[in-house]
Image (tube, grey):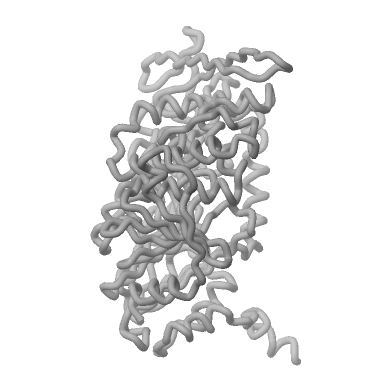
Amino acid sequence: MALKAQVFVLIIAFNFIAFEVRSQPSVTAKDVTIRRTEYGVPHLLSSTLRGVAFGLAYCEMEDYGERVVKPLVEAQGKMGLIQGLDAVEGDMINKQIHEVVTEKYNLLSFETRAMLNGFAEGVTYYLMENPDVFPEYSNFKFNGIDVAVVSTFVTQPLRGKRILDKMKIRKALLDSLNADNESGSNTWAFGPEKTESGHAILMRNPHLSWQAGYYEAHLTVPGILNFYGDFRIGGLFGIVGGFNDRLGWSTTNNNPDIDEFYAIPVDPDKPDHYLLDGKSIPLKRKMVEVEFKNGKGTGIEKKEFLTTSHGPVVAREDGMIYLLKRAGHLEVRRAEQFTQMMLAQNLADWKTAMRLQAITQSNYTYADADKNIFYVWNGTIPILSQASGGDSLAIQVNSEQQIWSAFIPFDELPQLYNPKGGYLHNENDPFHFTNLNEILLPKDYPTYFAKPRLRQRSQHSLGLIHNSDKYSLEEVVELKHSMRMEIAYQLKDDLLL
């Protein structure tokens, strides 16, 4: 069954409940129709991208209220006006992000800005229509910049002594957890040689709690967008998986190494200067001021942040400044990439969106109506000139060239396209055994890429699909619900002795 046909079957299976947004003070409100299934899943129809994003925000406000509006207040750096002094530190960080996004906002495409603005208008409109539901937020108004801030990551200045003392402990703890942690997601993609219909099939099996923060919805703008997937509560983007008429994708965790911790010697002759390539370079200083609620009045809190052209300073001690350089720091194009992925009509379009590399991690498994399947171990991974310090070690550097400045191009990341045997799988393990007919060898990739690993869920998956069988869509669903415990079969003979 082709992807387009699968979409149709999915949609007509529900009992729609249709209604219009009540009053219509703007073009956006007039232009959206909201229909919910008996399970409450919203299906949104509009003639514009702005309108359909408006409807999505309105539905999220109905369902989750404060979880939607609070991140937008935080994005403005104004949570201190509601929560007081405890929110000041977060406000200071978000105020800096807001300034950067404001400067770069008009560089985003028209389509992306239309959706960001529409979402902001939907939240604002709901608050205006329902002033008594969330009275503490009723006077807030939002715009697309606020929504973009929610999906923009910043490397926060950490307490230097704390991070230096605990990095090795943290790494040991993470290693012990990773050794036994089998939580996460599963995904399969089958090409035409592996399906009874001769079409591609994509199976997504996320392991998420009800409180994970994702929101299922269907967005339709005739002739432009027809996308069903999950969105981030309190923001528009952060899509783990979904599909349109022509293609779909699913994500699983991959945790690539996307940051480095550097130690740079201070200049002993100049206060607040550091040395690189023999040059004395001053630390950059930025004073940030935010307002906070103090009883019936307000107060002002100020703090100075230190940074360099390579990232924020997180500690200064032992004759060094320490900085954390992380991929995705102040990257405002995440919304752009997700928009282009939703609008893509074929693999070439989808790859063009992925080449923005604004989404810093996750395995992506893809299938389309052209019968292609594709996998990429996605990551905005730095090109390192020396061994990675990982989580346990700050790398001492004396030259600009020792600090990473570029990413490994998307097309050089581990990936498979229509592989032999017609299947792809991932269960949060690394990329090497995504298809046993075309193993991706460690020697072909940088040494700081993930090492080969094949845990029980991956072994179980391969036991189900690494064969010459062909599957119907119904059989794929049945396999997905397999109750087999792989380790029991592996140990059975020994236990029965």
Relative to 135, 471 lies left or right: left
Relative depth, front residue between 362 and 326: 362
The quarter of the rendered structure image containing the C terminus is: bottom right
Residue 98, placed above or below residue 188: above
Relative depth, front residue between 238 and 365: 238
The quarter of the rendered structure image containing the N terminus is: bottom left
Q: Quadrant of residue 69?
A: top right
Residue drawn at x 33%, y 56% is 221
Relative depth, front residue between 82 and 442: 82
**Percent x, y for residue 121?**
44, 38
Residue drawn at x 27%, y 63% is 347
Residue 456, placed above or below residue 242: below
Relative depth, front residue between 15 and 97: 15
Relative to 174, 413 lies left or right: left
Q: Quadrant of residue 209?
A: bottom right
**Percent x, y for residue 487?**
65, 79
Residue 266, placed above or below residue 423: above
**Percent x, y for residue 154?**
48, 34
From where the camera sits, is residue 47 visible? yes
Residue drawn at x 64%, y 62% is 181
From where the camera sits, is residue 334 visible? no
Residue drawn at x 60%, y 28% is 79
Q: Residue furthest bottom?
A: 497
Relative to 406, 392 lies left or right: right
**Percent x, y for residue 44?**
43, 57
